[in-house]
Image (cartoon, rainbow, N blue to C red):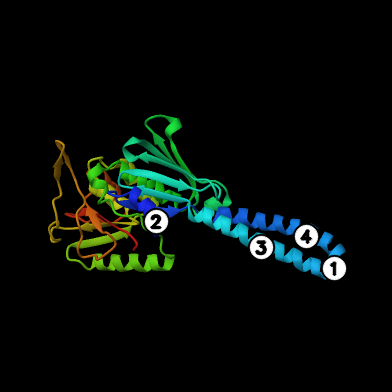
Amino acid sequence: MPIDKTLKQKYQGEEILLLTRRSFVIPLGQVIRTIVLLAIFCFFISLFLYLTLANTGLIIALVIWLALTIFFLFVHYQIWKSSIFIVTNKRVSCHLRPTLFSHYSKDINLDQIIDVEQKISGILGFLLGLGTILAKSKAGPHDNFVIDNIPQTNKVKDFISHLLVLKEEERQQAGHFSVKLPLNKKKELVDRVINQVKALRGIGDAVVLSEADRQYIWQHEEERNHGVFECLARDVTIAMTHNGSFRAPEGEITVEKGGKVIFPPVTFSEIKGGDVVSSSPGWAIHEYLRQKVTVHDMEATLLLGLNFE
């Protein structure tokens, strides 16, 4: 989504990881109600004009209704177009336009967020994944960040939560939030990756993890295993097994930062595109994955994460 010059200047020096608008679905209901009310209003005008101007009065009423409808459609479109939700490597922001002649904006630094919650309510929200994002501030409830009617609420909440566990210098390389592809395209991409992975020397089984599996691993993996969290932050996470004949890692598997040893994500060059990373899980998650993939003697587990482009 393009960003105007004013916002470009505001976020100069920051990496914009997520840029989206509030969903048009809920405002669409407001637009329909407005058009219906205008139709009722113009109907009564037409009755009055018909008594005085006959058929000409009906035409005048219809023209008034069309003009007012076009005007209100334009107003609603401008309000929707100007309401933007942004996540950078430093903060979460919103720029909203409640009416045509008013503007509201709010920022909260990622370092000031202590927790992120989501709320989905209503039939449309449940079916379309629309909901509210709440970022709780260290300063207290009065500084909390709230924005509603956000598409893919589940994934947006997980994406922000993932950024919170990273250090500031790591967030810029966290990868961009990606838009969903049609289901058939997703399946085609995932099947292709699974086949490519299984064809590699030393790789055994490979399966796509469910959202429940990803949530379990997110909650139970060691905090220092940054590579695993990077895999989980991608659109798809694949669990696979490998033996000793599989190639050596393509990068450092341990890094010391701030006196602590962490496990960073490692590239996986056999899979092209999709911001692909890999990581070895800790022992507890390895044992959990044994229930998901077939692990033979002398085999270890490995996670692979990739985004839909």
Nearer to us in this view, 80 or 141: 80
3D distance between C-alphas at marks 4 and 1: 14 Å
- Name the amino acid, label 1: Ala
**Could one spot residue 48 in this view of the protein?**
yes
Pick whichever of labels 4 and 3 is earlier in the sequence: 4
Disc sitting over residue 67 in the figure: 3
Pick whichever of labels 2 and 3 is earlier in the sequence: 2
* Tag 2 secondary structure: loop
Q: Position of residue 132 (x, y in %)?
A: 48, 45
Give me the residue at 66% from left, 63% from top. 67
- Name the amino acid, label 3: Ala
Disc sitting over residue 43 in the figure: 4
CB under 8 Å between callouts 4 and 2? no
Within-10-Å neighbours for mark 2: few <14, some 14–19, many 20+: few
Q: Position of residue 218 (x, y in %)?
A: 32, 45
Disc sitting over residue 138 in the figure: none
Disc sitting over residue 54 in the figure: 1
The N terminus lies in which quarter of the figure?
bottom left
The residue to which callout 2 is attached is 4
Nearer to us in this view, 30 or 249: 30
Q: Position of residue 96 (x, y in %)?
A: 48, 47
Within-10-Å neighbours for mark 1: few <14, some 14–19, many 20+: few
